[in-house]
Image: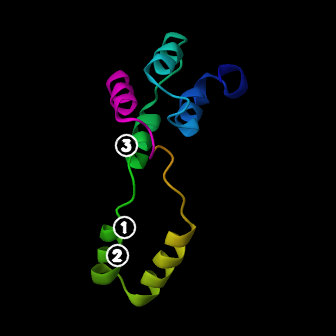
Amino acid sequence: LLAHYGKAHALFHAVRLGPTFIDIPVCQTLITRKVPISRYFIQRLLMHFGKYDQKLIELKIEHNVGQLDADRIRAFQQKIKSPWASNLPIFVFTYLLDEG
């Protein structure tokens, strides 16, 4: 991971690889090897952790947006994949937040 992506991007790609790869010992190893936990990484982690709330999106479309925007949002919804850190285990998520 470090050799292929470098220190600056190692944590990002570890999270991207998902729960089959990242766990507390992997995080500890990366941190002991001086992989930086940037403020930007923590911000992205907070924004992308968890799943989209489909009901909330539908309510926003129904109550807050004009028809043209609603059509664009529905078209975009069909294209989106799950967020980058959506399947990260909660214990890894909290560990990274504590270390950051």
Q: Position of residue 17 (x, y in %)?
A: 58, 36
Report the residue at 54% width, 63% height from top: 80
Q: Farthest right residue?
A: 4
Residue labelled with disc 3:
46
Residue labelled with disc 1:
54
Instruction: Point out the stretch of residues depicted in magenta.
Output: 86-100
Q: Calculate the distance from the C-alpha at mark 1 to the C-alpha at mark 3.
A: 19 Å
Q: Farthest bottom residue?
A: 67
- Asked if residue 43 lies in the magenta stretch, the reply is no
Kind of residue at badge 3: Leu
Q: Calculate the distance from the C-alpha at mark 2 to the C-alpha at mark 1.
A: 6 Å
Disc 3 residue crowd, few under 14, some 14–19, many 20+, Cα 10 Å: few
Secondary structure of the residue carrying tag 1 is: helix
> Do residues under tags 2 and 1 come within 8 Å of each other at their CB atoms?
yes
Which of pointers 1 and 3 lies earlier in the amino acid sequence?
A: 3
Q: Can you tell which of label 1 and label 3 is closer to the viewer?
A: 1
Kind of residue at badge 2: Glu
Disc 1 residue crowd, few under 14, some 14–19, many 20+, Cα 10 Å: few
